[in-house]
Amino acid sequence: MRIGLNRFIKYFFSLLEEFKEALKNENVLRQEFFLSLVLIPTGFLIGETSTQKILLISSILLIPISEILNYSIKFSVEIMLKENQHLSKKIKHIGSAAIFLAIGNVFITWILILFF
């Protein structure tokens, strides 16, 4: 059991370093992360019920998660598909569309909870 906990702790700190590196290198991710730091406490304050709070906060968390996934997809595509620029461009656009949907989800969720 002790070995598993040590591995988990090492893995956690390794992931934390990778996250710091992504924040350092990706301007958009950094902006979305800091926006999330403002909007998550706002979601706690605005939500009247536990369900509303969960919806407000989880919708915000989807944006940086989508951005990190898009960042990893773009990085992988640039390495693997240097010759096929058309396919590479198409894959990157699909990743960007996922971020667009996550942002749209935030707007819809927040507007429905705030005004209806």
Image (cartoon, helix red, strand yellow):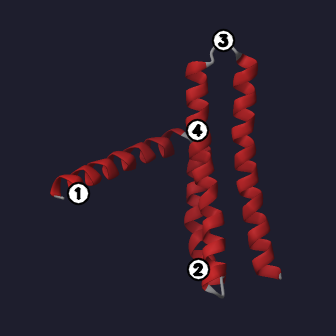
Q: Position of residue 42 (x, y in %)?
A: 62, 76
Label 1: how many Cα within 10 Å (few below 14, some 14–19, many 20+): few
Label 2: how many Cα within 10 Å (few below 14, some 14–19, many 20+): some
Mark 1: secondary structure? helix
Question: Which of the two discs, 3 and 4, labels the residue nearer the N terminus?
Answer: 4
Q: CA distance from mark 1 to mark 4?
A: 29 Å
The answer to the question of whether label 3 and label 1 lie on touching residues, with beta carbons closer than 8 A, is: no
The image's mark for residue 5 is 1
Q: Position of residue 82 (x, y in %)?
A: 62, 15
Q: CA distance from mark 1 to mark 2?
A: 32 Å
Give the amino acid at mark 4.
Tyr
Residue at image mark 3: 83
Q: Position of residue 60 (x, y in %)?
A: 63, 63
Q: CA distance from mark 3 to mark 1?
A: 44 Å
Give the amino acid at mark 2.
Phe
The image's mark for residue 43 is none
Give the amino acid at mark 3.
Glu
Mark 3 or 4: in front is: 3
Mark 3 or 1: in front is: 1
Residue at image mark 4: 71
The image's mark for residue 44 is 2
